[in-house]
Structure formats: C-alpha cells, structure tokens
Image (cartoon, helix red, strand yellow):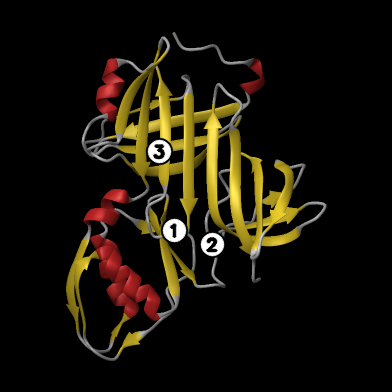
Amino acid sequence: MTSAVPSMFFDRIADVRIGLPDGVGRSWSDIRIEFEVEKSLKKDPNTASISLYNLDPVSVGLIQSTGAVVMLRAGYQGVPSLLFDGTIPAKGGVTIERNGTERVVTIEAGDGELQYTESRFDHNFAALTPNTTIFAALLASFGGLGLAPGDPLPPYVYQSSQTFSGPSRDALEQICRDVHCSWSIQDGNIQILIQNIGGRKDVAPLISSETGLIGSPKPTKEGCDFDSLLNASIKPGGFVSIVSRDITGFFKVLRVKHHGDTHGAAWTSSVESKRAVI
C-alpha cells in the first residue's frame, strides 16, 4: 500500500513519463516519487536517479523495455516544469528492491546518453566549407537531438578540406574548439556556449529569501554556491540573479543538483555558479 501523503507536501507536484519508440507510454503522478538529478556544463551526459514506489507489474515491464525514454517534471501546484529528459540504458538502468512492504523501482538515466555513446559522423568536406554547413550535417547524425537555448555557432570557413570519421561527439568537440565554444547536452538538446562569456538566453530567475533561497550563498573563488527550494528554471549555462545580505549580482550556473521526494523532506536545488560577465 502506498504511504499517505503528509498534508504539508500537498503543494508539491511531480510526474514521471516513460515512452517507447513505438509510441507506447505511461505516466505517474499519484505515487511516491524520489529523484536526484545532476546537470552540469560537462560533456558527459547529465544523470537522473528516479525511484517509483509500488508500480503495477505492467508498468514495471514497460520501464524495463529496450529503448525507453524518461521525462521527469516537478514543481509546485499548477503545471510542473521539466527537470530531466533522457534515456534508460538497456542494461543496468533499472533495479527493483523491497523497502519493507513497498516495492521500489529505481531508474538510472542519462540525458542524450544513447546519442552521445552511439552516434557516428563519417563525412568529407571540401575546402572553403563553412562550419555551419558541417554543423547542420553533424546535428542530424545525433538522431533526435536538437538545439538548446544558447549561443549561435560563430561563423568560420575552413580553408582546407575536413575529414571526420568517428563518434559524433568528437567531431562536435573539434568544430566547437575551432571557434572557442563549449558544448553540452541539456534536456535532449545540444547547447553551444562561447567560452567564458557565453550563456543561455533564458530569463534569469531571481534567487532571494522571498523566492526560495535557503540560508546564505557561500562565496567561492569564481562566484558562489547556494541552495534553494526546488527550481527547474535553474539550468547549466543559464544566469541567476542573486539578492542576499552578503552577495548580490548575476551569476552563471555551472552545476545544479535537484533532489526531491514527494513524500519526504527533500525538495531542493543545490547550485555551483560563477560571477557572470554581462
């Protein structure tokens, strides 16, 4: 039997959706959901650990199917916001355990992990080919990944012919390095940022004691670390506007870890940031 939800947690909302390539899918929002989502600007895929309590056997079978994708949304009242969008590995991505009388299914997923691991790019381009032409072909090789809000790829024309043969991620690394950009995968899309000064073009959320800031930000060499109530609008590469007693200003998010439990105390976002160049 699913545990009763304490009244103090009624304003929290979370739902998990699992889908298969053939269009079959299910969603859950009325069960206990625990999650830990870690996102950063690193090239390795962002990760999510999501635990679902007391699922029926059909749902468990769906989650264990090859090629399953998972979407996690969470927030407060109304419509929850996207927190994670990724794929479940065919092996080792799902575990089933008993916690007393409850059965807990835990999903370990990666954001764009399948495309990151398996996509290849084998192409030759003649001299005087613009990098935007190569990038368009490269993006198609990732099979379903689009573009996240970020910086446009700075234009560049290759004076010599270019040959690519290997993982798509390696070709993307070269193209970005040639124009001093970095890349990462965010919510199933490739995000391009100009190194040091680039950033997402989303509206910077206000982080203060009135909007969920927990305690005081901790100064670091480059910026600050802080905790807030769960906030899906805090994204790697995006900016936040911090207003606190000791630290105020715009900061660029380097890493964020979202931790939540619809039936427990956890419902927070922990952030590493650096002071933004605006």
How far apart are labels 3 and 1 at the CA level? 16 Å
Q: CA distance from mark 2 to mark 1?
A: 8 Å
**Within 10 Å of the Cα at label 3, are there few (<14), some (14-19), or many (20+) other Cα atoms?**
many
Q: Which residue is mark 1?
A: 148
SS class of the residue under badge 2?
loop
Distance from Cα at disc 3 to Cα at disc 2:
21 Å
Q: Which quadrant holds the C terminus?
A: bottom right
Per the image, label 1 sits on a secondary structure element best described as loop
The residue under the point 38% across, 32% down is: 17
> Tag count in the figure?
3
Residue type highlighted by circle 1: Ala
Q: Tell me the number on the disc at residue 200.
A: 2
Residue receiving disc 3: 71
Mark 1 Cα-neighbour bin, 10 Å: few <14, some 14–19, many ≥20? some
- 2 shown above or below 175: above
- The N terminus, quarter of image: top left
Q: Is residue 150 left or right of residue 118?
A: right
Q: Is residue 99 above or below residue 45?
A: above
* Left or right of residue 254, residue 133 in this image: left
Label whose residue precedes the other's in the sequence (2 or 1): 1
Identified by mark 3, the residue type is Met
Q: Secondary structure at mark 3?
A: strand
Q: Are marks 2 and 1 in contact (CB under 8 Å)?
A: yes
Does 216 appear above or below 101? below
Task: Give the residue at x 64% y 67%.
Answer: 276
On the image, the x and y values in percent for residue 156 come to 38, 84
- Give amino acid for label 2: Arg
- Where does the image place residue 149, in percent across and percent down from the top left? 48, 60
Q: Position of residue 93 (x, y in %)?
A: 30, 36
Which numbered disc flags the more N-terminal residue, 3 or 2?
Answer: 3
